[in-house]
Image (cartoon, rainbow, N blue to C red):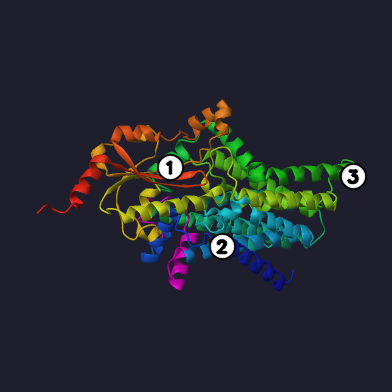
Amino acid sequence: MRVPYRALIFVVAFVALLTLHMPFIGLPYFWDEAGYYIPAAWDFYKGWDFIPTSTLPTGHTPLVMIYLALTWHILGYSPFVTRVAMILIASATVLASHALARRFMGREPAVWSALLLAISPLFFAQSSLVFLDLPAALFTTLAVFALMSERFLLFALGASLAVLTKETAVVLLPVAWVYASHRDRASRGAAGNAQEGRAARRARQWLALVLPLAPLLAWTLYYHHKSGFWTGNAGYLEYNLYSTHDPSRIAWSVLRRLYEIFIGGFQWLVALGAVAGYLWGLKIRHGRPTTQKPAAHLHGVASGLIVVYVVMLSVVGGAVLPRYLLPIYPVFFLGCVILIWQLPRAAGRAICVTAAVCFVAAWFINPPYPFAFENNLAYADFIRLHQDAARYLESRQPERRILTAWPATDEVSRPFLGYVARPFRVVPVEGFTERDFEKIEPESFDVLYLYSRKWEPSNNWLQRFPALLRAQQTHFGYAPQILDSILVQRFGLTLEAQFERRGQWVRVYGRREAIGSSQAADRPASR
């Protein structure tokens, strides 16, 4: 493929993603962006600290934070610059996906593979957000491209960048080792160079295949030297490692991960299309698969990546977030389109067009069960609601103490996140369940900043399936938010303001005693 054509693909992807994200590109930071990734990048930007000091360190490898900090040094700090920088990474991922697809397919199916990736609701929503998983998808895809091309030094570079982006990308390496071992066995009987030459070449190949362990080991030793932990911190390890090994939880996590890959966000359309293409190929070839050998190798690597990611993310990790699966998305869509394209052309195109339309609809349609707002454009509604609430709070007495839960605690206390001009005094609460308010004293706060932390649709499907509800409650910490009426009665609250957007809401309550005191203080003294 000529370089100008690849450049055209990148430019088209970047312009399209940038244009479609224009309504959201100036928004301040969301959830884990505000809670960890932006503060971590900010610390490197201000003090060249590889390990964050303004937030709890988690042990994540630092490449994305370094990239953002250097971008801010060149272009200045702002959410706009940050989000454009992330869209550049998303565009490069689309290009890498297309380049990988062109090794196995013609131009049209390769374009469909890259397009379906780009507009899939999770990938699209994440394209401008500061998380690690989409950049990890870029370097994982480049590593797979190099592996399929047998360019092992390029593989070492891509895989090293992947693990420096997010340490969990190291699970790519066992898949590459199995693939390389299989290729070695297949080539042993073939004619070629002398045995000595083949042995030297294999030694260089395997050195490149294990080389990405070196930067991860170096980071781990550095992190341990600085923090005393091999990764994370005490609370992080408890939440993500020590508390996740219950066999029942692992089984439910596997089911959730499989749902997120093959069903959620209308991805069942491409998954069913792939099954139909495979069965059609068996039929017309009388039971023999129709995929050519290189495509079969790609399916093997893609299947291996899906398996290792599902297993890893089911055994470790307290939060079962779909974005953690983004590194496998490019090979997932590529593998599906390869099989879909075995169908008659009209059928293959119909499946791809239908999936594309449904993907775009899923940017705006929330599912009838709890989900992470970051899975589609619901995250933008969340941010805008919190902007409205922050503006309201700034228009009132700024000295009032605000009781709220993270991430709103950071939003109103850290001006560099983009919500407030100066910090408020915050009284943090763990969450908005009944248990979280048990030890809160009325005198400890003046304002309650309450908001929808979870998507709770009125027709919540969890209520229809008791087994699913129990699993969510037992293994994944699901609990409904406390009713406003209980808090109003317990703390003597008055509703000051409320804001709503597409099923999400923010309510600001003031304590009656605090309101009375502030009004008395505002009255002019009698003469």
Pick whichever, 497 or 134, lies toward us: 497
> What type is the residue that disc 2 sits on?
Ile
Callouts 1 and 3 close, C-beta under 8 Å: no
Task: Give the residue pinned by disc 2.
Answer: 87
Q: Is residue 30 left or right of residue 339?
A: left
Residue stretch rendered in magenta on the structure: 50-79
**In the image, what residue occupies the spot 66% across and 59% down?**
205
Pointer 3: residues within 10 angstroms few (<14), some, or many (20+)?
A: few
**In the image, what residue occupies the spot 61% across and 44% down?**
308
Task: Give the residue pinned by disc 1.
Answer: 237
Task: Give the residue pinned by disc 3.
Answer: 284
> What type is the residue that disc 1 sits on?
Leu
**In the image, what residue occupies the spot 42% across and 39% down?**
238
The answer to whether residue 146 is visible is: yes
Of the residues tagged 3 and 2, which is closer to the observer? 2
Residue 375: x and y in percent read 56, 48
Callouts 1 and 2 close, C-beta under 8 Å: no
**Quarter-of-image position of residue 436:** top left
Residue 248: x and y in percent read 55, 29
Of the residues tagged 1 and 3, which is closer to the observer? 3
Mark 1 element type:
helix
Q: In the displayed structure, would residue 81 be above or below residue 372? A: below
Pick whichever, 515 or 324, lies toward us: 515
Cα distance between the residues tagged 1 and 2: 31 Å
Residue 57 painted magenta = yes
